[in-house]
Amino acid sequence: MDDQMVENKILMIRGLKVLVDSDLARLYGVETRTLNQAVKRNAKRFPPDFMFALTREEIMNLSQFVISLKKIKHSPNVNAFTEQGVAMLSTVLNSERAILVNIAIMRTFVNIRKFVSTYEGLAMKIAELEKKYDKKIDKIFEILRQLIKPENNKKEEIGFKG
């Protein structure tokens, strides 16, 4: 399973990283209907922080902006699974492929978390450097302004002053 392929399917919805049911079904090699039936039979395993149904507005937005999800606008309901929900799917779908797909998805979520953590650390370091060097750069510009003031550019007249 290609980690990049999985990463491209992860979406930000309601501030959460999720995979929608149709993408998960494709990854697992089952029909979306089959995946959702398995989830429905095990509803207690999927609290709202593991899985939630998208609103009609969210479905329409996704179908407009995510090319692979054009068909979902005709779906009556679309479920989004968080990282925990995807992990729980492995207890519901017991095929060899489901196990391999889950491993790939979990690795992808971990890699995204590492990347975000690194990015946030870099952003903080850049902000610190900006603060530190902004003052020094301001000082340099002030010195340059003083050097180019018209009074500093006046040339001494040559000749006798009397």
Image (cartoon, helix red, strand yellow):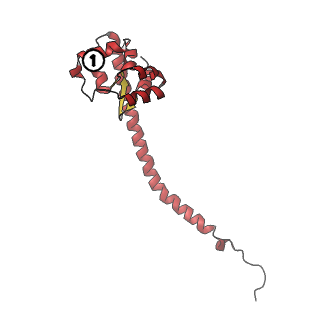
Mark 1 Cα within 10 Å, few/some/many (few <14, many 20+)? many
Residue at the outermost top position? 95
From the viewer's perspective, tell me whether residue 108 is left or right of residue 143: left
Residue at the outermost left position? 44
Q: Position of residue 131 (x, y in %)?
A: 44, 55
Residue at the (36%, 30%) spot, across then down: 17
Q: Is residue 103 above or below residue 126?
A: above
Q: Is residue 97 above or below residue 85?
A: above
Quadrant placement of the C terminus: bottom right
Q: Position of residue 128 (x, y in %)?
A: 42, 51
Within the image, what quadrant is residue 50 found in? top left
Please, what secondary structure does the residue beneath circle 1 have? helix
Which kind of residue does numbered mark 1 sit on? Answer: Val
Within the image, what quadrant is residue 8 found in? top left
From the viewer's perspective, tell me whether residue 158 is left or right of residue 91: right
Q: Position of residue 148 (x, y in %)?
A: 64, 67
From the viewer's perspective, tell me whether residue 80 is left or right of residue 62: left
Within the image, what quadrant is residue 49 found in? top left
Q: How many marks?
A: 1
Quadrant placement of the N terminus: top left
Of residues 101 and 75, the one nearer the viewer is: 75
Residue at the (52%, 63%) spot, across then down: 139
Q: Is residue 120 above or below residue 36?
A: below
Q: Position of residue 91 (x, y in %)?
A: 25, 16
Residue at the outermost right position? 159
Residue at the outermost bottom position? 162
Residue ID for mark 1: 39
Residue at the (32%, 12%) spot, across then down: 34
From the viewer's perspective, tell me whether residue 62 is left or right of residue 139: left
Of residues 45 and 3, the one nearer the viewer is: 45
